[in-house]
Image: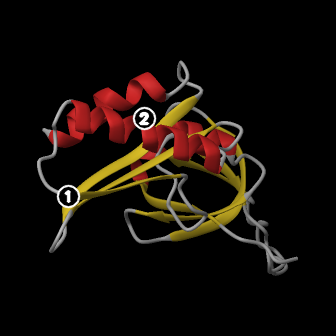
Amino acid sequence: MLKDKIIELLQAYLEDGRIFIVDVHVGDAKVRKNIIILVDSDEGIKIEECASISRRLASELEKQELIADAYNLEVSSPGIDQPLVLQRQYIKNIGRELKVVLKTKEEIVGILEEVSDDTITLTKEIKKKPKKGEEPENPVVVIPVESIEKAKVQISFK
């Protein structure tokens, strides 16, 4: 209920869809309610934009008296350690290396080449050469989005 109302209020601050909501988490801590909002845009989001959204949302929450007690409000971009959840996030990361964990627990690491409504395409690095008489492994893997448990961008220090 509160989460839905927060999402509804956030819509006014998303600059006609340029900024999008990745996740909203409302939880109770020992002393205060914690509200964590992750937002992003296709070009990335600046800290000033997060601060502006936070100020305007806090003002609206107080004006509408949606939360009676003290609360913590955090508006930020999803960190590099956060899994990708939206198609827009996958599209934004085309060309980067991803680690994808399937629902079967199989892990696939490769460069994100393509994103469609229901699949992503990775190109894996082939580390071993095929033995004589064996077919070479296909480096291109098409993964149905519904089979993905978690996908994260891999940080490269090369």
Q: Residue at x 53, y 39 (%)?
A: 52
* The quarter of the displayed image where residue 65 is located: top left
The amino acid type, in three-letter code, at marker 1 is: Ala
Instruction: Tell me where residue 104 appears, x and y as whole percent.
Output: 38, 67
Q: CA distance from mark 1 to mark 2?
A: 17 Å
How crowded pointer 2 is (Cα within 10 Å; few <14, some 14-19, many 20+) is rated as some
Of the 4 image quadrants, the one containing the C terminus is bottom right
Q: Is residue 96 left or right of residue 67?
A: right
Q: Return the mark for residue 56.
A: 2
Q: Is residue 63 above or below residue 44?
A: above
* The quarter of the displayed image where residue 108 is located: bottom right
Q: Residue at x 73, y 63 (%)?
A: 124
The secondary element bearing badge 2 is classed as helix
Instruction: Tell me where residue 148 appears, x and y as whole percent.
Output: 44, 55
Name the colour scheme: secondary structure
Q: Is residue 144 left or right of residue 69?
A: right
Nearer the observer, 1 or 22: 1
Q: Is residue 41 left or right of residue 138?
A: left
Instruction: Tell me where residue 6 appears, x and y as whole percent.
Output: 28, 37
Residue that sits furthest to the right in the current view: 158
Q: Return the mark for residue 132.
A: none
Instruction: Tell me where residue 40 appears, x and y as whole percent.
Output: 56, 42
Q: Is residue 58 left or right of residue 128?
A: left
Who comes first in sequence, dot 1 or dot 2? 2
Mark 1 highlights which residue?
70
Assess whether mark 2 and mark 1 are in contact (beta carbons under 8 angstroms): no
Nearer the observer, 54 or 126: 54
Q: Residue at x 34, y 42 (%)?
A: 58
Nearer the observer, 147 or 4: 4
The secondary element bearing badge 1 is classed as loop
Q: Is residue 117 above or below residue 146?
A: above
How crowded pointer 1 is (Cα within 10 Å; few <14, some 14-19, many 20+) is rated as few
